[in-house]
Image: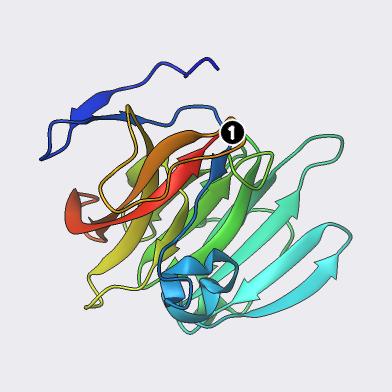
Amino acid sequence: MHRPAGRVRLLANGMRMQRIIGMGVFATALAASAPWAHPQSQSAWVFDAVSADTVAPSVVCYTGPRYIVVERQLEGSLGSDLFARASARGRCDADSLPGDLVHRNEWADYFSGVRGDVLVIDSGTGPDIREVTMLDLRSGLRLLHRSYLHLAPSADSLTIGLWDGYYLDKTGPGCPPPVGGLLPGVDSLFTVNLRTGDVRFAGRTRCAVRQ
């Protein structure tokens, strides 16, 4: 089975670790009971709480303690345009207002959540091929754009956890061998600085298999 091209990293034991690019991910967490093993519930413990109201066809207004984000799904296309403004304005207009941070859909972009002053955007056309973008709502700068599996909680309010997946040349120590034509892999946890966008390895990995 062909592996996609990607950057190769060396693990401490000398095995090569190849980053996933453009392939589905089939991750198997050893600790299935841990919260980071359930990405579908990540919004409850990663992002600020918001209320969601459908204000027009294909338009949803997410209201949080500090920001309002309006998601307008595009007709005849995957993805949405996003308009972010201060919650104090109290407006859920389905188009941009003066002073809004405007994010135009690039590739199947969807609202994921807000954490502090950072807007998080999820992109992809399937459950396993995802990218994440983080925008600073104060400056409008793009802090981060990269592949990922899902986000995770972190120890402080200035960072957020991010799991990403990689291929391995051979099964990692303590991991079960892949079956059914799948390939060995590993998931790695990183922390993202929500002020600078800097990404650092958090020293945690888990067994995985790749398609």
Residue 147 is left or right of residue 26, and the answer is left
Circle 1 packing at 10 Å, graded few (<14), some (14-19), many (20+), is few
Q: Do we see residue 94 in this rendering?
A: yes
Q: Secondary structure at mark 1?
A: loop
Name above or below for residue 60 compared with residue 22: below
Identify the residue at horizontal 73%, vertical 53% (top origin).
Answer: 72
In the image: residue 147, left or right of residue 79: left
Q: Does residue 33 sit above or below 147 in this rendering?
A: below
Residue in view at x 86 percent, y 35 percent: 76
Q: 152 or 146, which is in the foreground?
A: 152
> For the C terminus, which image quadrant?
top right
Closest to the observer: 11 or 23?
Answer: 11
Identify the residue under disc 1. 106
Q: Label 1 amino acid?
A: Glu
Residue 92 shows up from this direction: no
**What residue sits 22% from the left and 78% below the top?**
156
> Which residue occupies the foreground of this view, 62 or 124?
124
Image spot of residue 82 (x, y percent): 61, 52
Vertical arrangement, residue 145 with respect to residue 70, above or below: above
- Rendered image quadrant of residue 111: bottom right
- The figure's colour scheme reads rainbow
Counting the numbered discs, the total is 1
Left or right side of 128 for 210: left
Quadrant of image for the N terminus = top right
Residue 99, position in %: x, y? 48, 57
Locate residue 56, reporting x and y percent: 86, 64
| Residue 35: % across, % down | 44, 76
